[in-house]
Image: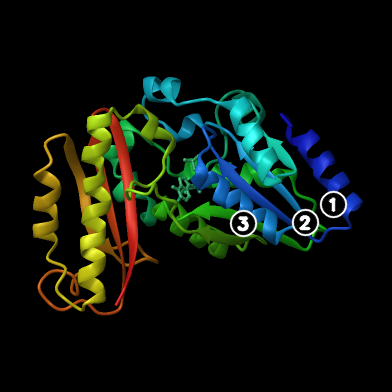
Amino acid sequence: MTTAAALRAESARLIREKGGTSQGLVPTMGALHEGHAELARTAVEQNDVVVASIFVNPLQFGEAVDLARYPRTLDADLALLDAVGVDLVFAPDVDEVYPGGEPRVRISAGPMAEKWEGLPSRALRRRPDRGGQAAALRDARRGRRPELPAYRAYFGQKDAQQLALVQRMVADLNFPVEIVPVPIVRSADGLALSSRNRFLSAGEREAALVLSRALRLIEERAKAHQPLDLESVEALVRSQPLVELDYLDVVDPRTLEPLAENCRDTPFRGEGLALIAATVGKVRLIDNVPLDS
Ligand code: AMP
């Protein structure tokens, strides 16, 4: 479907046809891989009708070149979603989502969007408007029918900040939708799958493994109630010349504020989320691991 009206009509028809009571949404930017497939499979298991959206949202990109070079593989994406059992794909163009090209009404995502991926210096380079994701979710929901009892939307833990933000937005704005987190899918060597990995050379891909290695080290220390000693982990990442570290920190999973104690010199207790972002060659990569001692 390329229009919200067609999506609305078709999803209503399918719900009627199946006598269904639940609808799942899997929002993506396309260039799908096994991580997206896992989101879609989970949604298909849990819902009568499943919609995936494919929309490369210009609001999520800082630079026109980055937007222009984002991979687009629609035919392969449709084949993957079909094989997994997704019922409908919503693939609108920009004008369908933002008539006239720009949203007139914007949702401010607040302080949770102002750090990490949302910091102005990073946002200028890449994602100027973390609210873009909030807007995308709201737009995708335009296709819903109010009498349907259960809506679920599926988000990967890969984008931990996005997930925390969307969960908080749905709670704060009282949206009748359940947000379902899906664990990160990795390749056998530990690299988190990403649509951007295809731009890594063989050497860069090898170098990028230091991200997941660093997170594993932090995870092991947390499990063993040891001090996390982030300085030594940071040194490990910086020893890899092809990797330019952007940030590495341990935060509260709900507020995304750095954990003041608990992570440097004292034994780790409780819950946390280790976040890492780095540029490898020209590719910006993010990864994270939940910590639970
Ligand atoms: P994207 O197409 O990159 O915007 O991602 C769409 C959805 O897929 C987001 O909820 C991501 O968190 C999720 N996702 C991307 N990569 C992975 C992965 N390796 N494992 C799990 N979910 C992922």
Q: Tell me the distance, in whole angstroms, between the alpha carbons under discs 3 and 1.
A: 18 Å
**174 vs 96: above or below:** below
Q: Which residue is mark 2?
A: 48
Query: Residue at the location (79% across, 41% down)?
Result: 8
How many numbered circles does the render carry? 3
| Picture quadrant of residue 111 | bottom left
Find out whether the residues at labels 2 and 1 contact each other: C-beta distance under 8 Å.
Answer: yes
Quadrant (top left/top right/bottom left/bottom right) for the C terminus: bottom left
Residue type highlighted by circle 2 = Asp
The residue at the far front in this view is: 188
| Picture quadrant of residue 256 | bottom left
Q: Earlier in the sequence, mark 2 or mark 1?
A: 1
- Asked if ligand 1 lies within 8 A of label 1, the reply is no
Q: Tell me the distance, in whole angstroms, between the alpha carbons under discs 2 and 1.
A: 7 Å
Packing grade of label 2 (10 A; few <14, some 14-19, many >=20) is: some
Does dot 1 land on a helix, a strand or a loop?
helix
Q: Earlier in the sequence, mark 3 or mark 2?
A: 3
Residue type highlighted by circle 3 = Thr
Q: Please state the horizontal and vertical placement of residue 29, each as a whole percent of the image.
A: 53, 36
Query: Residue at the location (13% across, 53% down)?
Result: 234
Query: Residue at the location (65% across, 40% down)?
Result: 81
Asked whether the viewer can see residue 173, the reply is no
Residue type highlighted by circle 1 = Ile
Q: Nearer the viewer, residue 283 or 6?
A: 283
Q: Which residue is mark 1?
A: 15
Does dot 2 land on a helix, a strand or a loop?
loop
